[in-house]
Amino acid sequence: PNHPQLMKSPEQEAATREAERHGCCCRRCKLRWELYFALGLDIIILVVGAPPLGQANSPVPYRVWLGFYLFAVVLPSIC
């Protein structure tokens, strides 16, 4: 049975789970650091890729790709 004194708090459980997981590079890197790095790359892509959208002659596939990238990759990673 579940004994209250043996159960971990939600904060302890979250810390344990985060310590067990790691992203793509190594076990020493915290998952949170890797996610912040990925968010930084997304912001760089947005800053570099957004100005051509204001041009009248930007290709439609580029607009579709950037819109998909923003709403399917960047926005969920911020939230």
Image: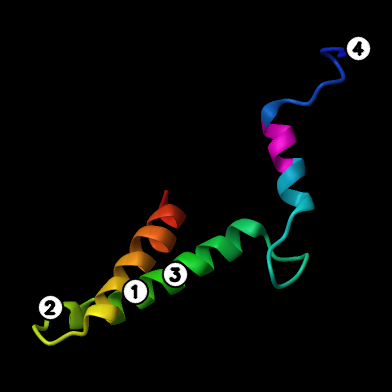
- Which residue, given by chain and number where applicable, does mark 2 sit on? 54
Q: Please tell me whether the stretch drawn in magenta is mainly helix, strand or loop.
A: helix
Left or right: where does residue 3 sit relative to residue 48?
A: right
- Residue span colored magenta: 11-15
Tell me if mark 1 has few (under 14), some (14-19) or many (20+) residues whose alpha carbon lies within 10 angstroms of its own. Answer: few
Identify residue type, mark 2: Gly
Which numbered disc flags the more N-terminal residue, 3 or 2? Answer: 3
Instruction: Identify the residue position indicated by label 1 in the image.
Output: 65
Which of the marked residues, 4 or 2, is nearer the chain's N terminus? 4
Please tell me in which quadrant of the rendered image residue 31 appears: bottom right
Q: Secondary structure at mark 3?
A: helix
Viewer-side residue, 50 vs 32: 50
Of the image marks 4 and 1, the number of the one nearer the N terminus: 4
Marks 4, 3: nearer the viewer: 4
Is 14 magenta? The answer is: yes
Residue behind mark 4: 1
Query: From mark 3 to mark 2, how far is it between C-alphas?
Result: 23 Å
